[in-house]
Amino acid sequence: MKTKSPIFLIILFIGATIAQDSLAILKYDPKLGLDMKGLINSPRNQIKLIDSKIDEIKANVKNFPIVEVNENDIVYMETSVGKFTMKLFPDIAPEHCKNFKRLANSGFYDLTTFHRVIPGFMIQGGDILSRDFDDENDGTGGPGWTIDAEFNNYSHKKGVLSMARSSDPNSAGSQFFICVADAPHLDGKYTVFGEVTSKIHVIDRIVKAPTGYSIVKINSKKEIPVDEDPENWVTLKDPKTGETIYSKTPNGLNKNNYRTVQQKNLYSDRPMSDVIIKKVRVKLSEEK
């Protein structure tokens, strides 16, 4: 899980741009066959911060005490779509566990988002830059330090909590991911340091959040229908599968511009409606 991935400006397939400080409601569209009336963009002005405020959060966590993780500690995570709990593995990844507890209990993770969701794979969050006003840098931030890898023999199965990093094995900082399906190809390459222990259905709910990629895929076909004019359709390349897909240009939109927007959206695994990490704390169960 690289912390730096291509994130593009999210633009709806109908060509409308969502303003950063507005509420946007995705209504039912017969072309999609989806009832999306309940999908509402979060009030972003409530979670977005100017750079100086982000610097304050990073300074606060830098001065926050580092404490040992008890094997009976519980991670309580509250998101905008539900709550769930996790346990940590201090026996196999002690430094990662202490780092996570420090970040969580300082409030560093509060109101950040799950900025990357991939069905059949994982959900990723923990980037403080998901709180700034630049969507394109989501996935590139950290707390101001890194920790060394603690690779272990625990497998990346569904529900496992693991640490995101760049190509450098020792570049983990604050970003983490939770597997929503078994991912054995990550074993020994990323540091597992915990797993979901209750209400695992919440991570399934998170990973179903519509993204630029999923919306384009839903609105595309593998072949142009025989009764359609090919001139009204654009050719796209799915970056994940390598397959060629086709999307019909909506009336009134420039075909070339539409193709450009759709191809960019295919690179976006960022939820179109923010999935907010409201609060994360690590503590003993009796302290709840």
Image (cartoon, rainbow, N blue to C red):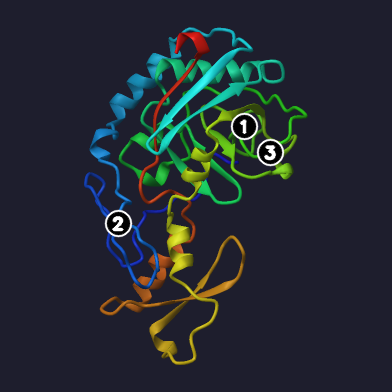
Residue that carries the numbered disc 3 in the rendered image: 157
Q: At 68% from the left edge and 38% from the top edge, which residue is drawn?
A: 157
Q: Is residue 103 left or right of residue 42?
A: right
Rounded to the nearest whole Å, what is the CA distance between mark 1 and mark 3? 10 Å
| Residue 107, position as x, y percentages in the image | 39, 19
Task: Give the residue pinned by disc 1.
Answer: 162
Query: What residue would you read off at disc 2?
Result: 37
Q: Secondary structure at mark 1?
A: strand
Say if 78 sits above or below 32 in the image.
Answer: above
Quarter of the view holding residue 93: top right
The residue nearer to you, when weighing 241 against 146, is 241
Earlier in the chain: of badge 3 and badge 2, it is: 2
Q: Position of residue 227 (x, y in %)?
A: 44, 92
The quarter holding residue 89 reads: top right
Say which label, 1 or 3, has the lower sequence index: 3
* In this picture, residue 190 sits left or right of residue 198: right
Amino acid found under the numbered disc labelled 1: Ser
